[in-house]
Image (cartoon, grey):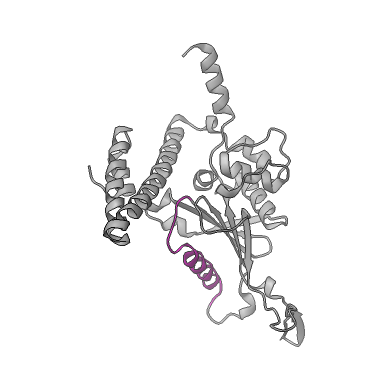
Amino acid sequence: MDKKEEDQRMKELKDRYIRFDWAIKRLLRQKANFGVLEGFLTVFLGEKITIVELLESEGNQLSEDDKFNRVDIKALNDKGEIIIVEIQNTRELYYLERILYGVAKAITEHISLGESYYKVKKIYSISVLYFDIGRGEDFLYHGQNHFIGVHTKDQLVINTKERNAIVSRLPSEIFPEYILIRVNEFDKVAVTPLEEWMNYLKDGTIRPDTMAPGLGEAREKLKYYSMTPEDRHAYDEHLNAVMIQNDVLDSAKLEGRMEGHMEGHMEGLAEGKAEANLENAKKMKAMGIDLEMIRQITGITL
């Protein structure tokens, strides 16, 4: 490699930014880096978010097999609300059921037995999805409980009485909110802060002149080139693992369909997945990936 090519390679490394899932796993849990996470939350929730502290999250107890597939973080903001952010790299059969369980668990964990139900905390669940969860034309979806009149179509405003005072709390102030971010469906030219964040989530690019909340800090703190060689190696291994697992699942799905036409869908899916796992395990071994990681990803011992 001549000097010109080396200079170009170094420039590309300097302009390369760490993926958001890795940043959450390794960097954004530090208070000094809260600005990046607060910017992300501010943009996707549509209001200024200030993080008070990070709470124990499900991801802290995940097995090594799950940690590259799913990364999550749970934060308490200055309004006493809990925000769960989860990045899911590959398909999961009961994904919606699991995020519902995660929200329910967060509610019950943060109210003590005997406390007033008024102490129930508002929960936001934000899912950054790198797989196709269903059909839809948008890349961003929002869901929440509302009480709508069956005949009148108006939204019910609920009044509760507590200690001789009338306190109005809308369902929107109580019930959890779910935000699903379909990263792979984003295909716009980034103009707004939301679109700039989608660009970063999808391909890791950040405009030099960005004014989007959090992305200015991300340009400074999430540079690939600023990592140590050891951290860069671990990061590259993470990307390889994500890519290979997606290949395994895609291959299994294809093989399962082909075999299913002849021997039945379930039998074909199992055989196709086993063959795909073995083939990908061999490829990973040839790439020099650690044998234990290969076993965790594919279930194959070489």
Position in image of residue 246 (x %, y %): 41, 46
Rendered view: 154 above or below 243: below
Q: Residue furthest left?
A: 302
67 or 297, which is in the foreground?
297
Give residue 57's position: percent from left, percent from top: 49, 59
Name the side, left or right, on which 145 lies relative to 98: right
Q: Is residue 266 above or below residue 289?
A: below
Q: Can I make out residue 214 in this image?
A: no
Q: Is residue 81 above or below residue 25?
A: below
Query: Is residue 302 toward the left or the right of residue 244 in the image?
Result: left
Query: Who's the residue at 58% across and 80% down the image?
Result: 115
Segment colored magenta? 89-112
Q: Position of residue 163 (x, y in %)?
A: 72, 86
Based on the picture, tell me whether residue 178 belongs to the magenta stretch: no
Query: 201 above or below 116?
Result: above
25 sits left or right of 256 in the view: right
Residue ranking furthest to the front: 262
Residue furthest to the bottom in view is: 164
Q: Residue furthest top?
A: 2
